[in-house]
Amino acid sequence: MEPIFALDIGTRLVMGLVITKKEDQSYEILASAQTEHRQRAMYDGQVHDVDEVALAVAKVKTQLEKKLGIPLKQVAVAAAGRALRTEIASAENRELLPVRWERENVLALEIKAVHQALRQLQSSAEHELQSYHCVGYNTIAQWNESEKISNLIGQRGKVAKVSVIATFLPRTVVDGLVAVLGRVGLEMTSLTLEPIAAGQAAIPANMRRLNLALVDVGAGTADIALTRSGSFFAYGMVPMAGDEVTEEICTHYVLDFKVGEKLKRDLNKKKQLSFTDFLGSKMVVAQAEVLSIIQPVVAGLAEKIAQEILKLNESAPHAIILIGGGSLTPMLCELLAETMGMPQNRVGVQIRERLGDITGEKNLKGPETITPIGIGIAALDGNGLQYYTVKVNGASVPIFALQLSTVAEALLAAGIQPRSFFGKPGAALTFELNNEMQVIKGSLGSPAQLLVNGSPGKLDQSLEAGDEIVFTPGANGKDAQVCFKDILPSQQPKQITWNGQREMYAPQILVDQQWVSESDPILDGYKINYIPNDDLNHLLKQKGYDVDKKEVLEIRVNGEVNRVGIDREILVNGQRQSTNSPIHEGDAIDVLTYKPTVADLKLMPLPMIFHVNGEEVEFPIQEILITSQGRTVSEAEPLYDGMDLRIDGYKQMPILSEILPYVKFPEGERSGSLLTLIVNGQPAEFTTVLRPGDRLTVAWRNNA
């Protein structure tokens, strides 16, 4: 197998090695080199001074090329594990009518979900100023019509939905590494994450069945990876490490950072330490004194590491393995074991010398060598993120792939929005025609045009380094557009005679009770009332006649309401016809209306009633008088709605003498007797005017 150049660009140290995999599946380090940054150019695993970091990388590269006698052009590197971000997001596609979901539709929906994940990541307060590379995604769920389904492809429905888990790295991290490598003529071919790389080397596969915690203590951070049941299952990070201890020493003794770093390293080797402070004073201090100064900081670091392990693992692991240059910090192992409540022998430092299946470069020792070895192993075993560039519409696009990359992922990396993969269908036109919903679909959109290396391509087509993609966005379909004449039947006007008048009988089109022309466009939401010109029923509708509804006049007679119907007769060419009879050119239609008259009411006034000697006496009706608002009305006069009539049987009130002929006098009246007249208890005369209901007493009184 071809050797791999593995490069670990750390906060303090740049270490490179060339490693190969042998036939017996062991690994051999062919050469190694390392150097420290001249000044602080890296912070927390991120490049801050490209030129300064490039100088250190160039030095390591040159040393390796001299040792091997070959030029190095490609390299595998690692990004800080804390930079990795994951998001779960969903995307949905809705259609007005059911469609079949093809592979291209589903892939475009997945990319749309990845875009949503990216928006979620960028909108969070913690990461709102960052932009990210998507380094891979997996579909975790799919739905068709709200039903969860294992595979959308080939299904039919109106609503499709997918959920993905997408993985991102900040562009600043990746771009900083790419910029440094570009300065020294190196091309990045594989990118792994530091905790993953460290775990590849520090914990053999057969040991990952145990619950172990790997802590990579660097200068700025401590990365944590946990194993269980044969694999790594969780990653974490503590934002402090070896530099915190160095800075405490520098603060106490007023030292330059490099002097403080050397003093910290010498703590494990010497009982007496000599150094010159920033002001030029030479000092000699005991090891115990410096240890007492850094003890609170180391205890704080141990406490934070313990808290993160317990948060991720929910209990103490079987053992804790420390790697990285910061793992050599005095007292760290002891204080971490004490904080975790674990035996001292369960917390230790892993060094290269104890790694199995790693040969070559015997002088490459210590815990700081674990991560670069792991970077090389990850690249050789294909566990890194493959990195290469392709061109999209002439622009170079970096591609990271956890699996084989596709055209869709390249378009995503180029910032092309998923909505441009397929042209949207034109908007449908929805309206009501005679109370029935009608839908006219817009035209379908056209898919994007894809050329890969000059030949037609597909979204799911695999890519190789250097491929060139030409992308033409899909065109949207046209919105539905129709006129009234496009949806209504063609009917010619007919000349008819209506109640003696010649006129044209044509179809009638109304929208919101307004007439429209058949050449007018139909707009979305229209409520259309269409009345054709085919039969008598539709003619009567156009004229406003409802044959099923009888017109009624409301008349008041002496204050009481009377309702009288109006009779109509409809004749076609002089003959009675049913309402569904067809109307032809030249037909004559007459609507004969029979309006009722006063005589139809058959009005009869009520007679006056009087009480004479305790008995009812009816005074006959003298004549019939019908009036309306003081005007005399004849029985031949037609009725109209709201007419107010009054009917009377008398021109005036009768006098008492006019009632007497209808009174039955008591028998046995004697001649010479006088007739006594009393009305309502009062004496009366023959000329006394009476009112209906008056009470009369009529009797003979003896004159003697």
Image (cartoon, rainbow, N blue to C red):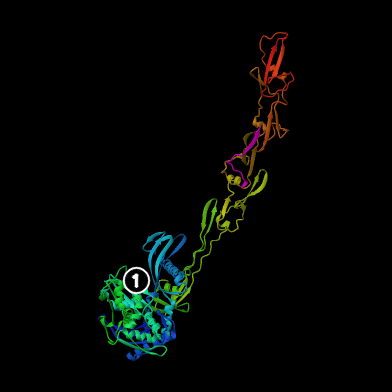
Quarter of the picture containing the N terminus is: bottom left
Residue 384 visible in the picture: no
Task: Name which residue type carries label 1.
Answer: Gln
Location of residue 311 with respect to 190 vertically, above or below: above
In the rendered image, residue 413, in percent from the top left (x then y), is placed at: 44, 74
In the rendered image, residue 406, in percent from the top left (x then y), is placed at: 40, 73
Whether residue 245 is in magenta: the answer is no
Judging depth in this view, the residue of 693 and 368 nearest the camera is: 368
Judging depth in this view, the residue of 490 and 520 nearest the camera is: 520
- Residue 207 falls in image quadrant: bottom left
In the rendered image, residue 285, in percent from the top left (x then y), is placed at: 34, 86
Q: Which residue is mark 1?
A: 307
* Residue at 65% across, 26% down: 606
Whether residue 553 is in magenta: the answer is yes
Judging depth in this view, the residue of 412 and 316 nearest the camera is: 316
Quarter of the picture containing the C terminus is: top right
- Residue 273 falls in image quadrant: bottom left
In the rendered image, residue 357, in percent from the top left (x then y), is placed at: 25, 81
**Crowding at mark 1 (Cα within 10 Å: few <14, some 14-19, many 20+):** some
The segment highlighted magenta reads 542-559
On screen, residue 490 versus residue 501, left or right, reads left
Q: How many marks?
A: 1
On screen, residue 591 versus residue 216, left or right, reads right
- Residue 231 falls in image quadrant: bottom left
